[in-house]
Amino acid sequence: MPENRQNGHVGATVIRPYGDTTGDGMVQLSFTLPVAPGPRADGAALQLANKMGIDPAMVVHSHAIGEGFTFFVVYGSVRHPVDLDAVRVEERAYPLLSPAEVNAAIKGRLRRTLVVLGACIGTDAHTVGIDAILNLKGFAGEKGLEYYREMSVANLGAQVGVPELVARARAGRADAVLVSQVVTQRDAHLRNTRELAAAFREAMGESRPLLVVGGPRFDPGMAAELGVDKVFGRGTTPGEVASYLVHALIPSEETP
């Protein structure tokens, strides 16, 4: 075993969290308990932290967030290491393209406008995510899909019913449907996504458009389980989505 496997140095495969010194295991955790603020509440927070393996633990911040509720920030040390070799995540399987490259691929290989429909479905009224991907102003310094001259983009906004979305996608001959879900209480985002996939499958079968969903609480590895083609998590940029659409919808130049 290499000398640096357990101390968190660059190149290690087994690492520990870093706080004050390399590999000291220090972590910071925030949570809320249904108890009024005070010494008893702080003691409850420390008990929880100890049961989670944070020992010693310190309550570095606490304040009331409503009658009978206290928010905590706890700081302390954990002994658990992280084995980087055991980490399993979904790696991006396609190159990131510039807007010019995306437009060129659509024009040169698809040879027609790529039609994209976007919406927030169900009771979700949070359009920040779908707006960031579709609207011209974009996100993180990148222009949204409306900026791409070879795409025809329609943003239906918030609280769109799944039957309406299916009807609009069919009428508009959409190549891809992008859905943003921010509301996650009781796994509403997962339930809505499964409903979306089932509705498109029943209405359009194999001729359905590409289904892409995204939101801060999605696991990108859940696409097959949810019945959609692609799941994007938090921090996704318009360029990543545009590059995926090219990868999924447009035959590569090597394809005969």
Image: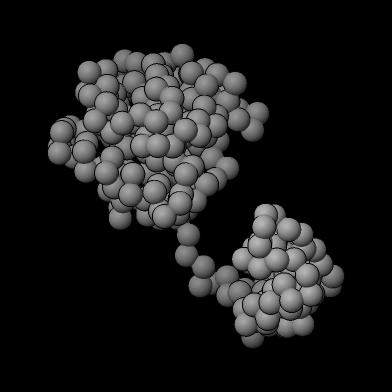
Q: Position of residue 83 (x, y in %)?
A: 58, 75
State the residue lying farthest toward the right.
20
Residue at 47% x, 44% y: name it: 183
129 or 37: which is nearer to us? Answer: 37
Q: Residue furthest bottom?
A: 1
Vertical comparison of 27 with 195: above or below: below
Percent from the top left, x then y, of residue 204? 16, 33
Whether residue 31 is visible, yes or no, is no
Q: Residue at x 54, y 40 (%)?
A: 236
Please say if 179 is above or below 105.
below
Query: Does any portion of residue 144 appear in the rendered image?
Result: yes
Decide if residue 22 is on the left or right side of residue 199: right
Name the residue located 49 percent from the left edge and 25 percent from the top edge.
134
Q: In this rendering, would 108 be left or right of 40?
A: left
Can you give x and y, in whole percent of width and height, for residue 154 in the image?
40, 19
Q: Which quadrant of the figure contains the C terminus?
A: top left
Residue 229 position, x and y percent, is: 32, 43
- Image quadrant for the N terminus? bottom right
Which quadrant would residue 60 be assigned to in this image? bottom right
Seen in the picture, residue 218 relative to 55 is either above or below; the reply is above
Asked which quadrant contains residue 11, the reply is bottom right
The answer to whether residue 214 is above or below residue 73 is: above
Q: Considering depth in this image, is 7 or 141 the residue closer to the camera?
A: 141
